[in-house]
Image (tube, rainbow, N blue to C red):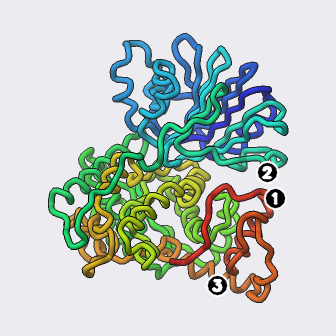
């Protein structure tokens, strides 16, 4: 996990250095730069795989091609198993991407299983930039055009770019790669196009074979994300998704003779803290709590809005406690697993169980849509709040094999029919892994379960006059009118640092459900 900057064309080395310095927090362990006449690569490293030998930019033995990467490639050992002896210079997973592209061309990016943003250059002036299909890892760019002075710029965060350049910044699309010769080309989708749910009758129920398939896919996804040369922990909210991830990770860690660290945050009486405490006791983790006051949350609000580079209430409510949690966890580990993505796979959100999605095909379409938009919403919040403290977050539920398994299930099985709660099939798949009351605990948004939602809503009511909402213009002009005291409060904080910039996420009208 790292911060990267890449430039192609007429290079301004001083600008590139400034950009790299602004993402130093993403990789405080090391810095590497490659400057060529028509290309520039910069890397701020968070050392996780091959701590001693993984300095970037990485290159081949003949020093003809270089690469920088942000993220993890979980199948790197399988990809490099057949390479000739002596070709690999390190144990870094990023080096697998280097050799695959060198041997097979840009199309080899589709073979990478992981979360990544990579940039490559060669001595002949060629290059490649690519982002993972779901967009777990961030990437922004300014395409070459009349206002760019003949240069194409890439960076891990919006804040990396000079203030004068920011209005031209775009989110680089997930599942796409760019080369100077071909421009942007799509190589994969967040939801593979061949995935189609099996058609079953609405009254039909799943059997043990199906439950085994779901359980095995989740376990394998967690196991892949335990790959690390440094300590791994879990963000444990006490909700179903993070509790399942923690239960699996605890067993994997115990098999190595170690104890899993878990981390929870909330106000003193919050439901999340109580539930996480009970899960931790059940799985035997080394549990750490961050107990916050209303004053702590208010103090962290300004920083949270700046860090996540957004003002949507859904993101900010959870970002504030997430940021405080990441600060504590970064003192103990360098990697944490989270429960992100489970609601998108198994229909965990309240709005997915309204009349609008009563038709199974409509529900499936909504799950696909939500997965395709995650990169600009929850994943943006998760990445920024953790990487601000040099902490890598990994999301097992967004594993490509698990996405395929989950989306092939009949959408009828994900509906709340016959008295079933949301995500019933996931809950049944892990019977016996968690205390019964926690396994069947109802869904709460993280910002609400931690107690932050209540505190921030009260703060907004105090700071913003409801009567003034009718006079708030549509902001930005081509987006939407601000709709609540909270959104006004967050937008004002955001605009102080990113004024004139259109948010780079696709957002829909804010709803608390």
Label 3, secondary structure: give it: helix
Residue 263 visible in image = no
Residue 137: x and y, percent?
A: 54, 46
Between 430 and 170, the residue placed more toward the observer is: 170
Distance of label 1 from label 3 (alpha carbons): 28 Å
Give the mark nearer the N terminus: 1 vs 3.
3
Residue 190: x and y, percent?
A: 47, 48
User: Mark 1 highlights which residue?
Assistant: 500
Question: Quick check: 496 left or right of 299?
Answer: right
The label shown at residue 303 is none
Question: Quick check: 433 left or right of 61?
Answer: left
In the orientation shown, which residue stands out farthest toward the top?
62
**Disc 2 + disc 1, Cβ < 8 Å:** yes
The label shown at residue 167 is 2
- The number of numbered badges drawn on the structure is 3
User: Mark 3 highlights which residue?
Assistant: 458
Question: Which residue is rendered at x = 65% and y = 25% of the image?
Answer: 181
Give the mark nearer the N terminus: 2 vs 1.
2
Give the mark nearer the N terminus: 2 vs 3.
2
Question: Which residue is rendered at x = 45% and y = 66% of the image?
Answer: 264
């Amino acid at each position: 996990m790292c911060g990267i900057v890449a430039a192609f064309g007429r290079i301004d080395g001083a600008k590139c250095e400034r950009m790299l310095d602004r993402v130093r927090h993403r990789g405080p362990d090391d810095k590497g730069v490659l400057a060529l006449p028509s290309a520039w690569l910069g890397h701020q490293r968070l050392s996780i795989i091959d701590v001693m030998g993984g300095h970037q930019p990485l290159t081949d033995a003949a020093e003809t091609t270089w690469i920088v990467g942000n993220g993890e490639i979980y199948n790197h050992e399988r990809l490099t198993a057949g390479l000739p002896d002596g070709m690999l210079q390190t144990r870094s997973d990023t080096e697998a991407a280097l050799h695959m592209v060198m041997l097979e061309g840009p199309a080899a990016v589709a073979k990478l299983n992981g979360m990544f943003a990579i940039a490559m250059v060669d001595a002949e002036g060629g290059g490649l930039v690519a982002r993972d299909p779901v967009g777990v890892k961030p990437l922004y760019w300014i395409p070459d055009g009349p206002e760019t002075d003949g240069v194409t710029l890439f960076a891990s965060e919006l804040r990396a770019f000079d203030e004068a350049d920011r209005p031209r910044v775009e989110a680089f699309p997930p599942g796409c790669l760019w080369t100077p010769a071909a421009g942007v080309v799509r190589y994969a989708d967040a939801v593979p196009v061949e995935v189609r749910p099996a058609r079953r009758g609405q009254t039909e129920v799943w059997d043990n074979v199906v439950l085994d398939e779901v359980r095995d896919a989740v376990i394998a996804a967690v196991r892949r994300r335990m790959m690390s040369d440094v300590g791994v922990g879990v963000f444990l909210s006490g909700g179903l998704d993070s509790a399942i991830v923690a239960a699996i990770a605890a067993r994997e860690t115990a098999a190595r003779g170690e104890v899993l660290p878990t981390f929870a945050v909330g106000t003193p009486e919050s439901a999340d803290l109580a539930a996480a405490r009970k899960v931790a006791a059940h799985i035997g983790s080394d549990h750490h709590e961050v107990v916050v006051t209303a004053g702590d949350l208010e103090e962290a609000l300004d920083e949270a809005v700046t860090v996540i580079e957004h003002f949507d209430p859904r993101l900010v409510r959870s970002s504030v406690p997430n940021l405080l949690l990441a600060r504590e966890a970064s003192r103990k580990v360098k990697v944490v697993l989270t429960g992100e993505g489970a609601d998108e796979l198994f229909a965990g959100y309240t709005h997915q169980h309204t009349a609008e999605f009563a038709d199974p095909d409509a529900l499936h379409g909504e799950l696909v849509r939500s997965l395709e938009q995650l990169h600009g919403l929850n994943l943006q919040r998760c990445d920024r709040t953790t990487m601000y403290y040099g902490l890598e977050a990994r999301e097992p539920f967004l594993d490509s094999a698990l996405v395929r398994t989950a989306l092939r299930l009949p959408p009828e099985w994900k509906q709340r029919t016959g008295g079933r709660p949301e995500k019933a099939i996931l809950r049944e798949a892990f019977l016996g892994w968690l205390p019964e009351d926690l396994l069947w605990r109802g869904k709460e948004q993280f910002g609400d379960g931690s107690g932050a939602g209540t505190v921030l809503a009260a703060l907004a009511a105090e700071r913003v006059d409801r009567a003034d909402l009718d006079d708030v213009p549509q902001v930005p002009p081509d987006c939407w009118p601000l709709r609540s005291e909270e959104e006004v409060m967050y937008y004002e904080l955001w605009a102080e640092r990113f004024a004139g910039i259109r948010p780079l996420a696709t957002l829909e009208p804010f709803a608390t459900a």
